[in-house]
Amino acid sequence: GPVTQWLAEMPKAELHLHLDGSLRAPRLLQLAAKHGVDLPYTSVEEVEAAYNFSDLQSFLDLYYLGASVLRDAEDFYLLMKDYLDVCRQQKIVHCEIMVEPQTYLPQGVDLSVVLAGFDRAIVEAHEGWGQSVQLILSFLRHLPEADCIAMLEAADLYRKHFCAIGLASAEKDFPPANFQTLYREAKNRGYELTAHAGEEGPASFIRDALELLSVSRIDHGVRAVEDEGLLDHLAANRVPLTVCPLSNVRLCVYDEMSEHRILELLERGLCVTVNSDDPAYFGGDLLENFAALESDLGMTREQALVLVRNGFEAAYLPSEAKMALD
Ligand code: ADE
Ligand code: ZN
């Protein structure tokens, strides 16, 4: 629609993007063939047919399977390059990308290999068209906290590559309370702090992420709608929620986009932002997420502008850098 067309030309930020979630079917099949990894699909059509999820876990199973084809620095370079090319096409001038090195440990891939590939693509995009990129070191909460702390310590050698830490993967049985030492250690190291909370898990996990982990941003957070006092707190403190509309529908947080509450949260004064989460799995990049809000929720030009501005407000950038991009 017209609002989305207008947004296409506007500089935007994306703050909630799992790089493994941007691995598209053609690249997935190419790398599986390269490394001789057996996948339960052999064509783009079969991959797309398999991406039919009933909840977060049914997605995560295929997401980690897909990421298992990533093995060498060239693979990580191509993965990052493919997403940064989307940033260029969609005018995503600043992105904060979640990378999850624990995902590659079963394949024996070292963090140095992952970052060497990423770095080459980031430097090319920065020199090529001035792309602004920051990385978030995202931990897998289905693994023990001690494993996460070991990865945090391994990342000390590469501290300058990351602006923040995050917490992703299965939410319901893995509450924020289990990761207090990890977050205290990360805070001591000077990382910004964010975490997934209130996607499948209850609103109380958002409160716990804020109180027990001291996060300054919440990934998803849509279940805050179940707690009026929490909504008041989030609005009064402008705590950003990195909302992912297509993801929420594809993972059955909402049955249909028309049930999504993002515009109500916006009108209530919360700092909500729009993001794609795992675009290769959920059927759209950032602009397609905005397009769904226009077509299914009637997002106005004014609302769209505030959503875009919120993306820069919520970014982990010094305010001078934000003004230069905005
Ligand atoms: N990892 C990748 N996408 C995720 C999501 N939507 N929720 C939790 N963990 C994730
Ligand atoms: Zn996510």
Image: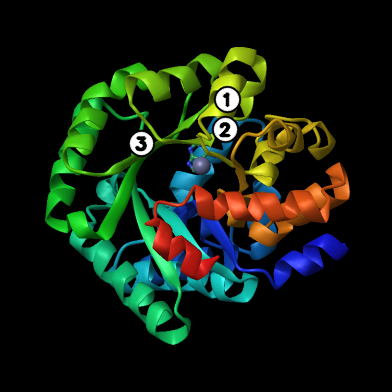
State the residue position of label 2: 56
Mark 2 or mark 1: which comes first in sequence?
A: 2
- Amino acid under label 1? Glu
- In the picture, which quadrant includes the N terminus? bottom right
Helix, strand or loop for disc 3: strand
Mark 3 or mark 2: which comes first in sequence?
A: 2
Circles 1 and 3: CB atoms closer than 8 Å: no
Q: Quadrant of residue 19?
A: bottom left
Where does residue 288 sit, x and y in percent of width and height? 72, 58
Helix, strand or loop for disc 1: loop
- Amino acid under label 2? Leu
Q: Does the beta carbon at disc 1 come under 8 Å from ligand 1?
A: yes
Where does residue 326 sit, x and y in percent of width and height? 55, 65
Question: What residue sits 41% from the left and 18% below the top?
Answer: 208
Q: Which mark is residue 200?
A: 1
Question: What's the CA distance linking mark 3 and mark 2?
Answer: 14 Å
Q: Does the beta carbon at disc 2 come under 8 Å from ligand 1?
A: yes
Helix, strand or loop for disc 2: helix
Q: Which one is in front in this view, the residue at disc 2 or the one at disc 1?
A: 1
Q: Is residue 94 left or right of residue 75?
A: right
Where does residue 163 sit, x and y in percent of width and height? 31, 52
Mark 1 or mark 3: which comes first in sequence?
A: 3
